Image: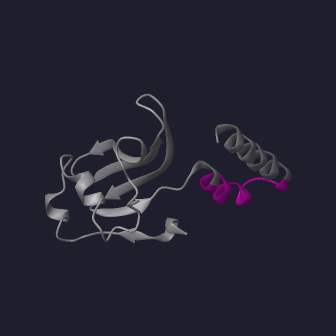
Amino acid sequence: STLNLTWHDTAWIPVLNPGNILDYFSERSNPFYDRQCEQMTGVEYVVVHVQEPILYIIRKQFRHSPTQVIPQTDYYIIGGVVYQAPDLHTFINSRLPSHFPDTIHQKVTGGISISKKVLA
């Protein structure tokens, strides 16, 4: 799973800023970057949040048209280190088993899988 993977390039870290963060993310050695990225239609990356100088959130999304996009994965960069953000299903699944009885957990995660099918 790429959820346990991180990536960074120490040469870039001192100079990261909103103007070059996508260039940093698209470095060849970054295993999170999809080389099929087209930035017109298909896979594209956008910066969705910046809290200088330490936090950047980048979204991988699929663009169907100029007005229709489907978010795929979010990545966060903290102090120059790139992490993949867990999707909602993974996050809830990792939290619920220890806090709720099995029947509630099954109903909630079952609802999530149904909503994922509807969104797809």
Image coords of residue 21 (percent x, y): 24, 53
Q: Please identify the quarter of the rendering in which residue 63 is found.
A: top left
Name the residue: 49% across, 43% down: 71
Q: Is residue 30 above or below residue 90?
A: below
Q: Is the magenta stretch mostly helix, strand or loop?
A: helix
Name the residue: 71% across, 43% down: 117
Q: Please identify the quarter of the rendering in which residue 118 is found.
A: top right
Q: Which of 103 and 89 is in front in this view?
A: 89
Q: Which of 56 and 58 is in front in this view?
A: 58
Look at the image and tell me in which quarter the N terminus lies. Answer: bottom right
Q: In this view, does 10 lie above or below 36?
A: below
Q: Is residue 77 above or below residue 44?
A: below
Look at the image and tell me in which quarter the C terminus lies. Answer: top right
In the displayed structure, does residue 50 sit left or right of residue 59? left
Image coords of residue 75 (percent x, y): 41, 54
Furthest residue toward left? 15
The magenta stretch is: 90-102
